[in-house]
Image (cartoon, helix red, strand yellow):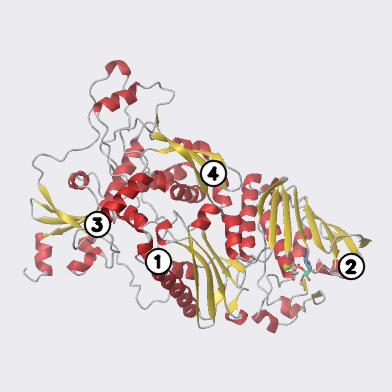
């Protein structure tokens, strides 16, 4: 490695100022990136108490010469660039020469380093940035930096530190990304004396994915590879039917650097257009490689964002790589899952509890009011593999001519009518995607307006004292005998078309309507939702941050019907799930929950967000084939005016009057 020198002031001034030491994770990031830049093949990171107790990073890289040890801790001292021109083609992770100076200024730091091939090593201790004497001593080749008492001299910063567990999770998440970005390096992460991550460093991305993100996620991936212009794209994406509940499993690297990028997310998701279920997000570990001069990494202090010189070229390369690889696989390879997606896997979306079961439920001892043992449940049990198989076989054998249920939807529902004026539909105009290099990202969760007041609120299991038990009212709502409306049919497996007595046509989004019904029901419930104990607990492999967040909130999740336990590393063991939710949706629901918890500003908002997710997960989905009776219940609710907006504020129904229709056809 070249000598470490302080940058000339005019070069230093060109560098985006970096607040490098915000929390322990930022220290770990800088130290590990230095080790990577030093050419290490094995890096061990150890932290105690979320890094507030101690952070130690050991590498077997090139080391630092004893006489240069103090220089490394000066501001703007770096061996990685010299001139302003170098800034245009940065190939190393570090380049500002600020990290060691900044870290040592707010901690007690020890460095021990021996250059490759040198006879002996040297050690240096710094306290609040003030160096002691360089001491010669024995050391393995490479560098070890130990940071203790972080922020000991900046009490204000100390006060803002989150709980140790939150800091640990942040470091753990970071280590996952670093390990994935360099499959050729063996990473080990030890927290509070416990080994939690160890990648082999065999150069294979799949080995790193397996070790860092878990077996289940690794199994859901398909390999993609392609290039466009000077942009190469390589890595793994989730198979279309293995969509995730949030974007947390989208991991992008640009020239080996973990970054967050709306452009890359949009390109990835465009690649899945019409292939992934609504509300699901693809996961990925994608490495984008392009000439260093085509990407500017000097735009963000934490270096987690980049600017591409040719955005369209990057977008197209990712989009085409993903789309071509997904198409090439052909979906015939996965007939079982294709059916699972299209059918309503639960079958009973609204409550069909009969009187007998109701009484049994209500008569149960108060200690366990919400738990419903799986075998005795009158509700549909967990969607099991047997049933999936049988459906799949039936489909293959008896597929009727012209059967189109599983076709991806090509056009928005309004297309058949021509675009009705926004004032008629009440929907917002959607920005056309065509011709735009970067389509706007669909938000994972939209801003929810205050829920509409609900007239009738009925608890899930009304708390009726046992003595006064009478035959309870069924929870299902039967359509009136002579309803003033008629269902004309369902289009695109998503919208119910319905005609009312007074000559109006309604298009009803069945998922949105059902989501609202669920939301109101859950919100009004006096007790936690009924739970079902899973015969085999589910091991949910999540990102470390998500896992930690969920476990921290285990008591809250319990109120929502999930019994979760720590299962080591980032895995969470789920023993019970709400009876309302398909067990196959457990992992995606938990991922969304984690996002809900992260975003909620206070407990109330978090609860509300969790309710949204529950309502959505328990709802029939657009694209599923629904039972006529299910549709009738929804139409009845809409016609009674009980359901107007989905919990995210989108309209549930679009009404076209006879006059409006006639106007469209130029009859009026
Ligand atoms: P930068 O990484 O931006 O150059 P740093 O303050 O992080 O700045 O590090 C200063 C210099 O110290 C680096 O340029 C590098 O020469 C040297 N250095 C830091 N950490 C290591 C390490 N683990 N192994 C070898 N050299 C290192
Ligand atoms: Mg550095």
Q: Earlier in the sequence, mark 2 or mark 4?
A: 2
Q: Marks 3 and 2: which is nearer the front?
A: 3
Instruction: Report whether the residue tagged 4 is closer than 8 Å to ligand 2.
Output: no
Q: Secondary structure at mark 3?
A: loop
Q: Secondary structure at mark 2?
A: helix
Q: Position of residue 615 (x, y in %)?
A: 35, 45
Residue 548 appears in the rendering: yes
Q: Which residue is mark 4?
A: 572
Q: Position of residue 356 (x, y in %)?
A: 26, 25
Ligand 1 sits in which quadrant?
Answer: bottom right
Please state if 30 lies on the left or on the right of 389 as rendered. Answer: right
Q: CA distance from mark 3 to mark 2?
A: 71 Å
Q: Earlier in the sequence, mark 1 or mark 4?
A: 1
Q: CA distance from mark 3 to mark 4?
A: 35 Å
Q: CA distance from mark 1 to mark 4?
A: 28 Å
**Figure disc tally:** 4
Q: Which residue is mark 3?
A: 493
Q: Residue at x 11, y 64 (%)?
A: 661
Q: Which residue is mark 2?
A: 66
Q: Secondary structure at mark 4?
A: strand
> Label 4 crowding class (10 Å Cα cut-off): few <14, some 14-19, many 20+?
many
20 up-or-down from 88: above or below: above
260 up-or-down from 493: above or below: below
Q: Which residue is farthest top?
A: 467
Instruction: Report whether the residue tagged 2 is closer than 8 Å to ligand 1.
Output: no
Q: Earlier in the sequence, mark 2 or mark 1?
A: 2
Q: Position of residue 564 (x, y in %)?
A: 51, 39
Q: Which residue is mark 1?
A: 272
């Amino acid at each position: 490695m070249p000598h470490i020198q302080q940058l000339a002031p005019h070069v230093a001034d060109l560098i985006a100022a970096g607040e490098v030491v915000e929390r322990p994770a930022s220290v770990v990031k800088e130290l590990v990136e230095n080790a990577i830049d030093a050419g290490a093949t094995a890096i061990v990171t150890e932290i105690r108490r979320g890094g507030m107790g101690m952070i130690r990073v050991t590498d077997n890289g090139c080391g630092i010469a004893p006489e240069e040890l103090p220089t490394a801790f000066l501001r703007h001292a770096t061996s990685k660039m010299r001139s302003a021109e170098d800034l245009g083609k940065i190939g190393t992770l570090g380049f500002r020469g600020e990290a060691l100076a900044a870290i040592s200024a707010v901690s007690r730091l020890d460095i021990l380093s021996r250059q490759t091939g040198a006879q002996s090593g040297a050690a240096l201790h710094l306290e609040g940035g003030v160096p002691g004497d360089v001491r010669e001593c024995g050391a393995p080749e490479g560098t070890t930096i130990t940071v203790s008492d972080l922020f000991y001299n900046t009490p204000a910063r100390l006060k803002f530190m989150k709980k140790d567990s939150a800091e640990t999770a942040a470091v753990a998440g970071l280590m996952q990304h670093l390990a994935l970005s360099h499959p050729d390096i063996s990473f080990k992460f030890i927290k509070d004396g416990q080994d939690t991550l160890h990648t082999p460093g065999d150069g294979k991305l799949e080995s790193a994915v397996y070790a860092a993100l878990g077996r289940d996620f690794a199994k859901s991936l398909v390999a993609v590879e392609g290039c466009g212009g000077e942009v190469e794209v390589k890595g793994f994406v989730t198979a279309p039917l293995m969509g995730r509940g949030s974007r947390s499993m989208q991991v992008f690297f640009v020239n080996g650097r973990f970054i967050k990028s709306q452009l890359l997310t949009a390109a990835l998701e465009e690649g899945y257009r019409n292939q992934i279920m609504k509300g699901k997000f693809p996961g990925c570990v994608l490495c984008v490689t392009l000439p260093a001069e085509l990407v500017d990494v000097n735009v963000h202090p934490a270096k987690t964002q980049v600017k591409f010189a040719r955005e369209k070229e990057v977008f197209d390369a990712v989009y085409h790589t993903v789309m071509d690889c997904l198409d090439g696989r052909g979906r015939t390879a996965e007939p079982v899952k294709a059916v699972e997606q299209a059918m309503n896997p639960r079958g009973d979306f609204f409550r069909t509890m009969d009187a007998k079961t109701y009484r049994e439920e209500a008569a149960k001892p108060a200690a366990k009011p919400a738990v419903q043992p799986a075998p005795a449940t009158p509700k549909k049990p967990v969607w099991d593999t047997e049933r999936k198989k049988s459906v799949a076989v039936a489909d293959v054998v008896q597929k009727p001519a012209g059967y189109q249920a599983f076709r991806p939807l090509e056009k928005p529902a309004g297309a058949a009518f021509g675009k009705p004026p926004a004032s008629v539909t009440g929907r917002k105009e959607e920005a056309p995607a065509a011709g735009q290099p970067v389509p706007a990202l669909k938000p994972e969760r939209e801003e929810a307006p205050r829920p509409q007041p609900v007239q009738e609120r009925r608890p899930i299991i009304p708390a009726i004292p046992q003595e006064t038990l009478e035959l309870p009212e069924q929870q299902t709502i039967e359509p009136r005998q002579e309803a003033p409306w008629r269902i004309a049919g369902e289009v695109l497996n998503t919208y119910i078309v319905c005609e009312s007595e007074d000559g109006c046509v309604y298009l009803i989004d069945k998922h949105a309507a059902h989501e609202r019904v669920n939301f109101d029901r859950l919100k009004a419930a006096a007790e936690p939702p009924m739970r079902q104990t899973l015969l085999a607990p589910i091991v949910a492999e999540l990102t470390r941050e998500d896992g930690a967040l969920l476990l921290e909130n285990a008591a809250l999740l319990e109120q929502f019907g999930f019994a979760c336990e720590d299962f080591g590393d980032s895995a969470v063991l789920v023993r019970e799930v709400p009876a309302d939710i398909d067990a196959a949706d457990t992992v995606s629901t938990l991922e969304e929950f984690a996002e809900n918890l992260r975003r909620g500003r206070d407990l109330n908002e978090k609860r509300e967000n969790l309710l949204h997710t529950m309502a959505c997960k328990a709802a029939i989905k657009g694209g599923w084939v629904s039972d006529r009776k299910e549709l009738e219940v929804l139409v009845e609710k809409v016609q009674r005016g009980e359901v107007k907006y989905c919990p995210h504020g989108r309209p549930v129904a679009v009404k076209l009057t006879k006059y409006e229709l006639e106007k469209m056809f130029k009859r009026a």
